[in-house]
Amino acid sequence: MSDVHGNLQALEAVLEHLDGGLAVDGLVFLGDAVGYGADPGACLELLGERCCALVAGNHDHGVIGRTDLSEFNEEAKEALLWCRNRLLPRHKAFLESLPMRTVTEGFLCVHATPKAPEAWNYIFTYEDAEEALSAMETDLGFVGHSHVPLVLRQGPGGKISVVREEELRIEPGHRYLINPGSVGQPRDGDNRASLVVYDKEQEAVRLHRVDYDVHEAAVRIIRAGLPPSLAHRLYFGV
Ligand code: ZN
């Protein structure tokens, strides 16, 4: 899962969903624990407790000053400054400890792109997808950052296609780059929290969408004095 962005209501709903009979063996977080939402510290603590592998996102680096705030839009910047004043030293130390990329259980995890994670680029074009897939040391990789679920599949001949099914079979000889979407601020027009579950035995990846208390998350953003647009967008998933 990726891009929790301080949305505790969404994160708790996702954990409850995963604990409710899915029996996952491990949770992997693809970055951006903080920024935008009203509960960055609580989210960081839950993620730290529950995840077996985590990587840093651009907002995580923005808060600790590793990525310049001029790289962010106005609302994001305001939320990061707000966050910087509220996180405890142990939260900041935890963010500082996060790697840029990691390989776990045979798959690659990175927030933005496999080739130059620190540039925080997006995968927009066919060429971007080619570059990203060729920079993977594994046949399966997961990225976050865009807040939009996406599955890219590269065939043995090198051709890349977008897979539309919600349940995907991992085929031998193919390479996959998967974006699970965002837990705390989905942007694909669906306001439910988004994540994927990878079943290594069945060689299957399934997209999950989870309802959560959007209103509560929005009210907490307003009460915290964060930009109201950050609350409003949650209702629409944009
Ligand atoms: Zn993000």
Image: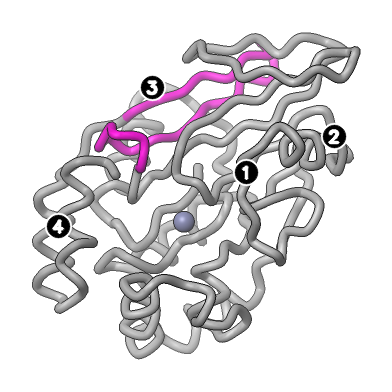
- For label 1, the SS is strand
Q: Mark 1 to mark 4: distance in Å?
A: 26 Å
Q: How busy is the neighbourhood of tag 2: few (under 14 within 10 Å), some, or many (20 plus)?
A: some
Q: How busy is the neighbourhood of tag 4: few (under 14 within 10 Å), some, or many (20 plus)?
A: many
Q: How busy is the neighbourhood of tag 3: few (under 14 within 10 Å), some, or many (20 plus)?
A: few
Q: Residue at 51%, 61% (x, y): give it.
A: 48
Total number of numbered discs in the rendering: 4
Residue 21 badge: 3
- For label 4, the SS is helix
Residue extent of the magenta highlight: 187-209
Report the amino acid beneath label 3. Answer: Gly
What residue is disc 2 on? 138
In terms of image quadrants, where is residue 28? top right
Residue 143 badge: 1
Residue 174 badge: none
Report the amino acid beneath label 2. Answer: Thr
> Does the beta carbon of the residue at mark 3 sit less than 8 Å from ligand 1?
no
Question: Please, is residue 230 above or below residue 165 in the view?
Answer: below
Mark 2 / mark 3, whichever is N-terminal: 3
Front residue of 122 and 193: 122
Mark 1 / mark 2, whichever is N-terminal: 2
Question: Please, is residue 163 above or below residue 146 in the view?
Answer: above
